[in-house]
Image: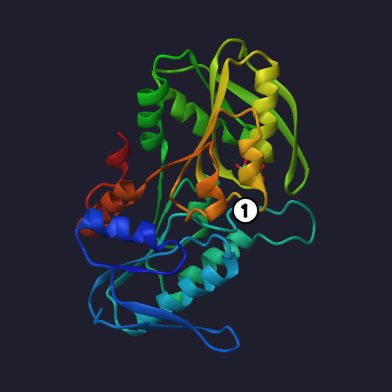
Amino acid sequence: MKIISGNSNLPLTRAIAGYLELPVVDASVRRFADEEIFVEIHENVRGEDVFVVQSTSYPANDNLMELLIMIDALRRASAKRITAVLPYFGYARQDRKPGPRTPISAKLVANLITQAGADRVLSIDLHAGQIQGFFDIPTDNLFAAPVMSADILARFGNEQLMVVSPDVGGVVRARALAKRLNNAPLAIVDKRREKPGESEVMNIIGQVQDHFCIIIDDIVDSGGTLCNAAAALKEQGASDVVAYCTHGVLSGGAAPRIDGSQLKELVITDSIQATEAVKDAGRIRHLTIAPLLGEAIRRIADESSVSSLFD
Ligand code: R5P
């Protein structure tokens, strides 16, 4: 088994490799003067089971292209099996046509990764479970819920917890977390989004009065969804509001926006490498998913069960 990394999240790859007690494959990714990407793998991978770790986060297109070129290099170097490990799968939110004459870019990106030569995909908290079906190769979708629930119980286990889905689409994820939190009650935010990056809370379904609310979401991008939901929950009498999100996209001024919001805390994982602004944000805390990804990689290599990680 070999672990190789793109440039999007080297600290995470090193942590995964540390968990597996393996070195990261020596490779270089360079740019030509016109910004074309050139990849060179400096050690033999012939016949190896190779895991290439790359989040297609900001800059999404560069990181995606880097991933595709690395897969191509590995395939031409006769790797036996190539698994694209995508801690964050960018373009996932474009998983359906929101209107006429619009693309389904998540499917296009899945096709690109497959055509480049990936044999398998490993990701975590895909925006929608159905995205697994966009890949015609085996795709494992892990969940950060065990990491999050352990943290919630350790920090807030004595509170009167209520799990909140920030939109109707997140109810299944919220219910799964609530189950892990000793069957905590559930509330749902009725969110409307007229255009990308702007959301509005219409209603809250559930009695949140005097509850310690845990919002769970897959992605925090502008932070609008969480900040609006936190304000609405407080208005309805929630005692405190904390948010747990797997993927801290946190673009633009999201980090200061979180710091100035009604959220007591936002907890994200290291699926995306944090920018300086995110590291400096006083209310953003980080959990690592490196052991979870490392264990899943070990099990894929050993051909043992990955789903039993979540029993
Ligand atoms: C949407 O369906 C996702 O699950 C997130 O709620 C959304 O991407 C968050 O975006 P923002 O932070 O920009 O409101």
Q: Is residue 223 above or below residue 105?
A: above
Residue 67 x/y as whole percent: 46, 71
- Is the N terminus in the top left, top right, bottom left or bottom right quadrant? bottom left
Taking the image as shown, residue 40 lies to the left or right of residue 169, namely left
Report if residue 294 is visible in the image.
yes
Farthest bottom residue in view: 33
Q: Is residue 132 above or below residue 230?
A: below
- Residue lying at 49% horizontally and 74% vertically, measured from the top left: 66
Taking the image as shown, residue 29 lies to the left or right of residue 264, namely left
Query: Which residue is under mark 1?
Result: 95
- Residue lying at 41% horizontally and 36% vertically, measured from the top left: 145
Q: Is residue 201 above or below residue 69?
A: above
Does the beta carbon of the residue at mark 1 sit less than 8 Å from ligand 1? no
Q: Is residue 166 above or below residue 195?
A: above
Viewer-proximal residue, 65 or 122? 65
Viewer-proximal residue, 307 or 165? 165
Report if residue 138 is visible in the image.
no
Residue 218 x/y as whole percent: 53, 42
Secondary element under disc 1, as helix, strand or loop, is loop
Viewer-proximal residue, 108 or 247? 247
